[in-house]
């Protein structure tokens, strides 16, 4: 099972040899067995990488994330074919029923708000948590009344203050965006690995967004990032902050009756949602919990 998250921070050359990722840097040569890697994060723009390695990373469905000059995720490697029956899966995806999509989106939104409320109660924000729990009772199919948006405003103001907005340019938002990007990429990997397109979402339909479905599925996992950002109280967004956020993939949660790394939990969860969509059965969705 792939479980390692490898982060490349310095100038080096990445190559493939005998099923190993070979990192050639000034400090020396190091190797990592490819079958152990779940995510490869390339932070430094001075990194060079061979074509044969890229092809093998794609073949093994290893998520590769590239960062820009500010070390923020800006692109990822997405294989053209993630499944042997991707044509059939695409037909299924195009045929997903609106009523089922609406119900599943409602379930995802409810789970997100439920976890936000739990987080607020842990922070002793009882009044705001109670308000979010009331929103849970008001969710309609496809979240027509936008309980998610109302809950987000209450939630972020309770965590970071009344004056906080997600549009500000500060360390908190930089950390949130970075962490969300890592989780989004993990969801994209699983969508493609199961033979579906990330572009065709169940709620998100932005014509300029190549990851609409990923944006749908990632919602319940965002709280994992929120927890770290609030706990660490980042004053500056530096390399140490990025390491802590990437390491979220190695945290443990409980899903489907077993304790799993977050990286593996995302795999189980995404497949369950995709199965629910294709089989018109909302009960197939498997959400994670913090209780180990």
Image (tube, rainbow, N blue to C red):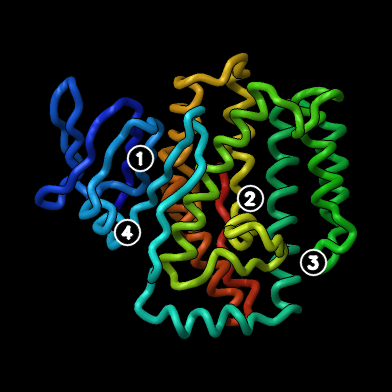
Q: Residues within 10 Å of mark 1 (few under 14, many from 20)?
A: many
Residue beneath disc 2? 220
| Left or right side of 25 for 115 | right
When asked about the image quadrant of residue 125, the answer is: top right
Viewer can see residue 35: no
The spot of residue 1 in percent (x, y) is 28, 54
Mark nearest the camera among 2 and 1 is 1
Q: Which residue is mark 1?
A: 5
C-alpha gap between disc 4 and disc 2? 27 Å
Residue matched to label 3: 142
Kindly identify the residue that appears in the image at 87 percent across and 32 percent down: 127
> Which residue in the structure is indicated by mark 4?
58
* Disc number lying in front (3 or 4): 4
- Marks 2 and 1, how far apart at CA: 21 Å
Name the residue rendered at 72%, 41% in the picture. Answer: 116
SS class, disc 2: helix
Disc 2 to disc 3, C-alpha distance: 16 Å
Which residue is painted at 57% across and 71% down in the image?
284
Q: Nearer the viewer, residue 287 or 22?
A: 22
Name the spot of residue 241 as percent of width and height, x first: 50, 23
Q: Nearer the viewer, residue 214 or 257?
A: 214
Mark 4 crowd level (few <14, some 14–19, many ≥20, 10 Å Cα):
many
- Dot 4 and dot 2 residues touching (CB under 8 Å): no
Toward which corner of the image does residue 83 lie, by quadrant? Answer: bottom left
Mark sitting earlier along the chain (2/3):
3
Image coords of residue 87 (percent x, y): 45, 83
């Amino acid at each position: 099972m792939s479980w390692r998250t490898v982060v490349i921070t310095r100038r080096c050359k990445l190559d493939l040899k005998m099923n190993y990722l070979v990192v050639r840097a000034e400090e020396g040569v190091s190797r990592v067995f490819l079958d152990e890697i779940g995510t490869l994060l390339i932070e430094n723009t001075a990194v060079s990488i061979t074509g044969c390695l890229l092809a093998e990373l794609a073949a093994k469905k290893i998520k590769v994330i590239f960062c820009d000059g500010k070390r923020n995720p800006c692109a990822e490697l997405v294989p053209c074919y993630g499944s042997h029956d991707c044509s059939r899966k695409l037909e299924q995806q195009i045929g997903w029923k609106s009523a089922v999509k609406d119900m599943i989106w409602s379930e995802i939104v409810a789970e997100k708000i439920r976890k936000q409320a739990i987080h607020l109660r842990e922070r002793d924000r009882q009044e705001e948590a109670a308000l979010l729990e009331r929103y849970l009772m008001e969710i309609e199919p496809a979240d027509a009344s936008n309980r998610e948006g109302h809950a987000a405003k209450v939630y972020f103001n309770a965590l970071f203050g009344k004056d906080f907005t997600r549009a500000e340019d500060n360390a908190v938002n930089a950390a949130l965006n970075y962490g969300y990007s890592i989780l989004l990429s993990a969801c994209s990997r699983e969508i493609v690995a199961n033979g579906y397109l990330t572009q065709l979402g169940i709620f998100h339909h932005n014509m300029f967004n190549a990851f609409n479905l990923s944006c749908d599925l990632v919602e319940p996992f965002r709280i994992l990032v929120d927890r770290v950002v609030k706990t660490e109280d980042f004053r500056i967004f530096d390399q140490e902050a990025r390491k802590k956020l990437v390491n979220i993939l190695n945290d443990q949660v409980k899903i489907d009756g077993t304790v799993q790394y977050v990286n593996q939990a995302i795999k189980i969860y995404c497949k369950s949602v995709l199965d629910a969509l294709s089989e018109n059965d909302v009960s197939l969705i498997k959400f994670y919990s913090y209780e180990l």
